[in-house]
Image (cartoon, rainbow, N blue to C red):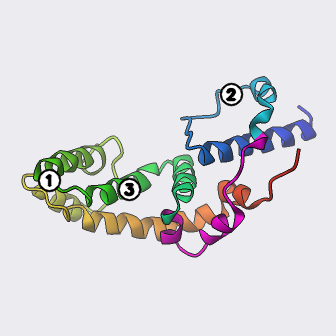
């Protein structure tokens, strides 16, 4: 493959990732997409990117990034590429959990979050200390709206200090900062 064709292919894959983020489409992998399929798509580059001022505002803080639905999606896609998507998914699940109003719903949602993210060998196990994990385990018999707060703060700190700075340097974020090309 010539260098020009390889560069074009790299740009196409980057643009497809940006479009997936914008339209909330998250294929588990783009590796199965063939170059010939991409060339047939053609129209994908016409999809709008989020406004540049919104993308630039994400540099202010992780909180600012998470206030934007598109920012959440871009960050989630970045974390997926780093095999740490469970962090944002757990954080978002906790945010939603805090809005529950009935004790029956609290118990059901707490069990789901615990099973998916907290228990040892959970499918999307988050990286928290054993003491915090044990506190949550102990609270599962009578879960409260605050039972995940400590773990959520730990995960937020992890994302803020580790993942967020790398996101700002990532191809995903940098690609969203680039002006759209006219075709």
Of badges 2 and 1, nearer the viewer stands: 1
Which residue in the protein does label 3 denote? 92
Of badges 2 and 3, nearer the viewer stands: 3
First reached walking from the N terminus: tag 2 or tag 1 = 2
Which residue in the protein does label 1 denote? 102
Please report the bounds of the magenta region as a residue range.
Answer: 45-66
Q: Position of residue 52 (x, y in %)?
A: 71, 64
Horizontal relation, residue 83 to residue 107: left or right: right
- Real-space CA distance between mark 2 and mark 1, rounded to the nearest whole angstrom: 45 Å
Residue at 85% x, 51% y is 181
Answer above or below: position of 41 versus 162.
Answer: above
Of badges 3 and 1, nearer the viewer stands: 1
Under circle 1, the secondary element is loop
First reached walking from the N terminus: tag 2 or tag 3 = 2
Residue at 26% x, 49% y is 113
Verify whether residue 93 appears in magenta.
no
Which residue in the protein does label 2 denote? 33
Question: How many numbered tags mark residues here?
Answer: 3
């Amino acid at each position: 493959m010539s260098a020009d064709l390889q560069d074009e292919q790299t740009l196409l894959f980057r643009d497809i990732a940006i479009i997936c983020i914008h339209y909330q489409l998250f294929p588990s992998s783009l590796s199965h997409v063939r170059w010939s399929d991409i060339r047939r798509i053609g129209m994908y580059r016409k999809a709008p990117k989020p406004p540049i001022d919104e993308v630039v505002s994400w540099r202010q803080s992780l909180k600012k990034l998470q206030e934007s639905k598109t920012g959440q999606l871009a960050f989630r896609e970045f974390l997926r590429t780093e095999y740490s998507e469970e962090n944002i998914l757990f954080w978002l699940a906790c945010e939603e959990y805090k809005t529950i109003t009935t004790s029956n719903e609290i118990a059901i949602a707490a069990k789901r979050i615990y099973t998916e993210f907290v228990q040892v060998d959970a499918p999307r196990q988050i990286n928290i200390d054993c003491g915090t994990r044990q506190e949550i385990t102990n609270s599962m018999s009578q879960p409260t709206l605050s039972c995940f707060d400590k773990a959520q703060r730990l995960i937020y700190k992890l994302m803020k200090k580790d993942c967020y700075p790398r996101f700002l340097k990532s191809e995903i974020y940098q690609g969203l900062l680039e002006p759209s090309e006219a075709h």
